[in-house]
Amino acid sequence: MMGKLKTFVNKYFSNGPKAVPVVATVLMIVLVALFFSMRKTITVSVDGSNRNITTFRSTYAQALKDNKIKVGPEDKVKPSLNSRINNGSIISIKRAVKVQVQIDGKKLVLNSAEDNIIDMLKSENIKLNKSDIISPKGDSKLKDGMKVVVTRVQSKYVKQTTPIKYETVIRNDKDMQKGNSKVLQEGQNGEKETVTQIIYQNGKEISRKIVKEIVKKQPVQKVVAIGAMSDSLSRGGNVSYTKVIKMKATAYTADYISTGKSPGDKGFGITATGTVARRNNYSSSVAVDPRVIPLGTKLYVEGYGYAIAEDTGGAIKGNRIDLFFNSSSQANEWGVKWVNVYVAE
């Protein structure tokens, strides 16, 4: 092969004028071949719009510049601008769009050629939490002039111990006179532990709710007995009453200390209504304020018994009643008490 080539060269390139036409032809063929080998047709796709261009350049950057196709710094180009061109190859250019992003109290203006909002935020190194809210949605396609709002959402959990209020239970006691009451069992508050979820948006609380509740200590009910005795008082028969008056009850006797009179004095041991002061099981004498309880009224005094309003006294005013006793020792034993006084019909 090399021998034949050498013979061809010696024959046509070393004989002067005879070789000129041959050399010219060969050069023409070589130049034409070189021309067609350097000439390349490529497709430029800009945002999906295609355009074919012819170039003799070796890189896309040179070819695009020759054809006045500008590429911005945020535009996406594939393959890269410095890649070598092959005939029939395709270069894709995705233009960046301007997007306004409101986040963390700031307004950012970004140029991005990413496909959607999430990809744009990632490319800008903007970190998102799972609970953050993006509007429009994160998978929305980017559009020029789009406004994006990122709302930061945070959850905080607060543990708190709070009391459980005890309940008060009322029980009717038929053996207790109406108006009376007695605490049978004191109440005690319980205790519970609650976990509250507090949600914040951009640092401001928007909601809170209890997500967990554990009772640490059960409350103890307060039990109160109240009088439910029938509206009649038995004394061989039934004695009905019309009302009950809460009164301060003191005690007195017929002696000088209580009445200022001694045995033998006029009116000693005699009540204001002229009866003999007495203490018995059926109709003891008591002193009242006639403006509150008229004289002659039959009464039942809690802890004392049945009585008749027959006497008065200088210190007995308003809701006070003075109970007669036969001896000072009995009077002293009574002392002073607040009692219910039942007014008989």
Image (spheres, rainbow, N blue to C red):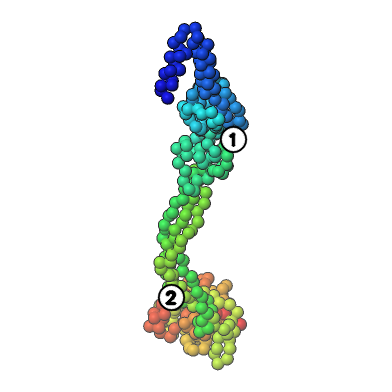
Of tags 1 and 2, which is closer to the observer?
A: 1
First reached walking from the N terminus: tag 1 or tag 2: 1
Q: Residue visible at 49% across and 32% down?
A: 79
Using the rendered view, name the quadrant where residue 328 is placed: bottom left
**76 or 223: which is nearer to us?**
76
Mark 1: which secondary structure? loop
Residue 224 image label: none
Q: Amino acid at mark 2?
A: Gln
Please name the residue that numbered disc 1 is placed on. 143
Quadrant holding the N terminus:
top left
Q: Residue 222 at x, y = what percent?
A: 46, 73
Q: Secondary structure at mark 2?
A: strand
Q: CA distance from mark 1 to mark 2?
A: 74 Å
x, y (%) of residue 195?
A: 44, 58
Q: In this rendering, is residue 265 above or below 45? A: below
Looking at the picture, does residue 132 appear above or below residue 297?
above
**Where does the image place residue 245, in percent across and percent down from the top left?**
54, 75
Foreground residue, 97 or 159?
97
Which residue is rendered at x = 57% and y = 91% of the image?
Answer: 237
Closer-to-camera residue (91/329): 91
Q: Dot 2: few (<14), some (14–19), or many (≥20) neighbours within 10 Å? A: some
| Image spot of residue 239 (x, y percent) | 58, 86
Residue at position x 41%, y 77% in the image: 335
Mark 2 sits on what residue?
185
Q: Residues within 10 Å of mark 1 (few under 14, many from 20)?
A: some
